[in-house]
Amino acid sequence: MSTTKRPVNESSSTMPILSSVSSRRVEKLRTSQLAYGQPWVWLFGGTLIICLVMIIGLLFLILRFGIPTFWPSRVVGITTIAGAKYMGDVVRTEDYRPEQNHIDTLPAKLQEAARKYIAEHQGKVERQLIKIGNFELTQTHHVWVSDYEVQNEEYPEWAMVVERSTNDGRFFGILEGFMTEGKLTATSASAAWEAYQEHAGEIRSLVREIEHLNKHELGRLSSSIKDAEVFVKEQELRYRKGSPQHEKALVRLQEVSSSLKVEQDQVAQQLAELNVKAGKYALRLKTFDGKKKNILLSEIVRAVPVNRLGTMAKLGVYFSRWGEFVSDDPRNSNTEGGVFPCIWGTLAMTLIMTLFVVPFGVLAALYLREYAKPGVLVSTIRIAVNNLAGVPSIVFGVFGLGFFCYLLGGSIDSIFFPASQIFGPKYGTGGLLWASLTLALLTVPVVIVATEEALAAVPRSMREGSYGCGASKWQTIWRIVLPRAMPGILTGTILAMARGAGEVAPLMLVGAMKIAPELPIDGVFPFVHPERSFMHLGFHIYDVGFQSPDSEAAKPMVFTTTLLLIMLIAVLNLAAMWLRNRLRRKYLVSQF
Amino acid sequence: MESSGTTFSGYRRQRKTRLSVRLGETVSRLLITLGGIGTIIAVALVCIFLVWVTIPLFSGAKTESREQQRLTWPGKPLLMGVDSDQILGWAVLADGSFSTFRLDTGEIILTQPLFVGAALTAVSHPSRHDQFLVGFADGTIRLGKISTTAELLDESKAATELKALVKNSSIKHNGGVAHRHENGSISFHQAKAVFDAPVALAAGQAVRAVDLSTRSTGPILASLTADGKLRISEVTETKNLITGKVKRELSGGEMMVTPREGNRLPEHVLINGVGDNVYLIWNDGTLQRVDARSIKSPRIVEEVKLTEGGAELTALQFMIGKTTLITGDSSGRVRAWFRVQKELPPLKPGETRKIVSHTGPDTAAGSDENRLVAAHELPQVNSKVTSIATSSRSRILAVSYADGSSHLFNLTNERPMATVQLPDKGVTEQLILAPKEDGLYAWSKEGIASWSLQTGHPEVSLGSLIRPIWYEGYPGPAHVWQSSSGDDAFESKFGLWPLVFGTLKATFYSLLLGVPLALCAAVYTREFLHPRVRSVIKPTIEVMASLPSVVLGFLAALVIAPFVSNSLMTIVLGFAFVPLGFVLAGFLWHMLPSKWIRALQGFRFLFIITVLPCMILLAVWLAGPIEQFLFDGDFKQWLGRPPGKNSASGWLILLLPVGGLATLFLISNVVNPWIRTMSRKVSVSREAILNLLKCVLGICFNLAVAWLGAHLLAWLGFDPRTSFFGVYDQRNALVVGMMMGFAIIPIIYTLAEDALSSVPDHLRSASLGCGATNWQTASRIVLPTAMSGIFSAVMVGLGRAVGETMIVLMAAGNVPVLDMNIFNGFRTLSANIAVELPEAVQGSTHYRTLFLAALTLFIFTFALNTFAESMRQRFRKRAFEL
């Protein structure tokens, strides 16, 4: 930015032209190059390119890291010069400058060679981050291996990647055999693989049954006992201990728990039987450094001999992992498994928000545009509503927590659920309803503004025609104006949904949770549980990416979640854009 | 609406409007009006509610006087207290007896001698857990506890006199007080004093003063006997396994106290909360500080004069935590003293300092590198201080004066909370603050006067939120935000300034990056891009706006931050090289034959694209050598080194933009006019070469200016590492600036582009028709016309940057420090709310202060947006008129 082309005064560049006309001195007609401002134009063009590169780079980054996450990459086995053996996925490679004390930890003989290697590469060495898994044996998920440390790299044929449902994460091992009821029934890898494929499906369905029993049956039973307990406490608080109502509630609790006890026992017995069945088979694996390990089939979500797979088989694994991601619960402290509760929570919240935002937004816009007397007051309100869209979302979160959760929810609790003093707040804390209402407040300006624009865009002639035919005001609005404004209203609604779905800051205050055991909308009466806290895709990104104890393990998960969220929002935005274009084409009227 | 009556044609209607239509009309009008106004009110409620929660912060304490009750003893009370429900009080009298009394009537319930056959000579101040230490004339001390108990009584088993008790009244019962509460339950209150067996300190030497502190490891005592010996002892308890008897043993060190003139020994001995300092205090205001870190060999390290102008010390008390000492004197001055680290001499260049921990014994005699300072002085009242009471749960203290008034203060911000006056001409001798801070009691010879008290939120005042405050243990007044800690003696520090500063820092850097990029890009899009390309590019940039900020924040924290940390020099160079590259390329473009230029004009954008990778490669390639040349091979290490050495290199980087501005000024005012006159004489290609030369020389000049300036500043002894630069933190303002700049670009871009679009086309046509070039039209006709619209775009962008939460939350490190350093983290108002509000107790000062922060954000952004909107409206009107 060392030069400028700005002429000192207005006349200098135009004067030659004017004077040339009068005096016919043709050689002065040429404009100075300064007038074209090429460097400036280039600089301005450059900024546009930087902006574009930033967006495209960002989207590319998300795609680049999000898409390959579930691809089953080859498993590498590395033997280092110090004798350590690692096997796992290469997560990434990078250049770094090794520190002296790291080399000092090597055996004396090898230090020389390592130093020489480093010197040859001008002090910069490549290293790879390997996900070695096997947390229960190694106590770590990842290791760094520098190039100078590598003695041998191989790709064992029967290297298995085992995804487990336990909290130890993945297991990398070489397939050795198959066990049935504690006895080794297959000793070769291929036979074991066949046996695994034969039994995996049946064990998976058993496991699913166990999960269902655990979660739904036992959950249902214990929740009805809990309800009875809460009722007892409520009656006690309402009418004092020992009152007839309290006694009655106690009797009911007794009845409920004794009748359910039988059922509970039945389910428990069923579970025990299923567990025995599911624990019948196990895979026998050997880690790369020679430790033996048996893994029960019931703990295995997916086991793949990655290095043997062809592209099609890998694609199969890839898509099955994606399927699991969108349909399953998270496990291993949110670093594996799926994000189904997050998707469900996001959708439920956005939906409830929309239910609030659309009617009220449209009503407000109708009032402002059609019913209120135009004047200073209305235009002030209009500007204020417009400006609310620019108020930071966290402010709405603060309001939501203070007003909805503490004030409204607290009052509801103290009036209808006195037992919440003992069992913890029900409505007096963050939950689906409060989050939806908070976001509804946050997004209602978007709907109001969009609806008002759409209403204004309906040609005056149409209204006048309607009035001329003798229709009343409401009839005109309902039959003529609203249908014409519908695309605009829909656009506003979708934009509001997109904004609501991507907003995280207020949710941190009003109900999004790291882990919410129960879905906010499920099959248990009354189906929608507005007081429950929920999981949210955006909050999940924040939580896993930022608060996870092992950020390296969580990273791929965050990228895929991000990809999902962005796709959701992109779909909503594209829909809005498409509608807006349609609207514009239909009524070529200025928006102002 | 008008469903009946005559129509405009003059004929009477044949048919009435159907009822359903009329009904629909009324209902819909009602519904829409109600719904519309309701929605608008709901939206307005946001602001109202925030204000409603915030207001109690600034309403002061409330006191209400209750009737004074007669209460006298034959002796003088040495210590007094009340229970937490304010039902009964207790007193230790000078003759060694313990008395309990009702607070509502002043009736003495019972008075019993505590120490039979021993003359009480010294009583300690109350310690945590209500522990007390008393000393006797025979040289023994006794450790004990004075506690109040409250238990609920079962009404069915209660005596008849209790059953007759009406609500909110008390009755003497069984050596205590029974009280029926508002909800009908009856509780029984009692005060008990239990003292252990005497422990001999020094046979025959009367104990003059004692104090104790209860640490987590056990009590520590300080005592002074008549022979001038100061003993500091730890109590070890051993329990006999067979008898179950607890045996207490004292162990520790002692030293002789030098009496002052007139052979006076100190009147008070105090020991601080952690037991590492003992204060010997004479009533003339002299304090000797004894270092007791090594308990075996205490030594005097400092002597301080607590009073001025010959005033006598009349009251002494510790604040909660026993770190801050409050002194009141006969001139009515009340001061708060605590120990701070002595100011150390500033570091010399290249010197490093080892911070000596305070726990180890300091062998050097004399100083312990600390000093006692009067950090706070309360507003003076021209009357002797008679008594001081401190709260056991916060930093509130009450001071009574000889004129019968008592004043309540919050110590931290020296905020006066309330003033009360004794009803008659009495002089308060004992002032008591109720344990829950809900009552104040003043005992005088006339009796006991009491006031009910609502403290409100004394920790916060408008001034204390933005002024520096001297917090306990800090070397001086400071801006600190530290809202909570596990310790109950913790002093909450609600200084909003670090957070406001963090917000400004984030906003500044993001605008620095975002505004030029967005505005220049908008101008190019509108004025120089082919409409067909524009229709693709504009929505692409608008897509950016819909990216959730949590995604941007996560990318900033997990991808951008490590990347910037690894290639810092490349990034810094990139900021200089990339714009320079575009300008240079523009000059090179002129070198082409004009025929080519005209032919390629339509593809110019494609050529511009190629510049970016070239310049980035250049930055990558040059980063190593330049880093080597300027910063001994590692910029980050240079940042981490103590300031002093090689500071010119840092200034060089900082001064490059300044030099750039100087060069621009020089070129546009001196060089360009010359070139313009030259252009009439020389050929096109000559002029192009001239321009290129100008550019290259300009760069050299820029470098020279920056270099000279840098060395001048370095020679003058300034170092950028004490201000703009400093230790590198991976999550820093640069990363946040980059990402948040990215977040505000689409907003500013869209609004600015709209503003440029609404400049009427006939202005452009007129300009072009007069023979102006595209550039001249854009820079002198379109831009000035659209300026107010562009300005409002920047305002809206600013509003977004101020309130952005997720990006700063994830990428800024969240440390509330006041530091200009661009490579350091910070905490913004919004991130602070997100982090702390879920943990804040509803209704607490902390909670309300966070609401205040939210309100500030609300008002600021709302005002900003309104301002921007009104500017935009005016601009639109003007553009329309043009």
Image (tube, grey):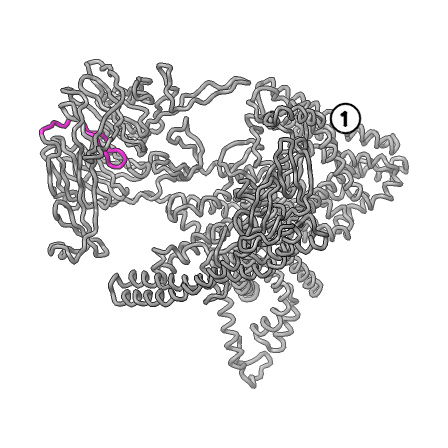
- Residue at image mark 1: B697
Using the image, determine if residue B564 lies above or below residue B629: below
Is residue B50 located in the magenta-colored stretch of the structure?
no
Q: How crowded is the residue under tag 1: few (<14 C-alpha within 10 Å), some, or many (20+)?
A: some
Q: Residues in magenta?
A: B117-134
- Residue visible at 84% across and 30% down? B689
Amino acid type at circle 1 is Leu
Does the image show residue A349?
Answer: no
Residue B24 image position (x, y, % from top left): 52, 75
Does the image show residue A247?
Answer: yes
Residue B708 image position (x, y, % from top left): 67, 20
Is residue B123 located in the magenta-colored stretch of the structure?
yes
Q: Is residue B177 left or right of residue B307?
A: left
Using the image, determine if residue B578 lies above or below residue A191: above
- Which image quadrant is residue B365 in? top left
Residue B421 image position (x, y, % from top left): 22, 38
Q: Nearer the viewer, residue B363 or A100?
A: A100
Task: List the single residue furthest toward the bottom.
Answer: B14
Residue A61 image position (x, y, % from top left): 67, 45
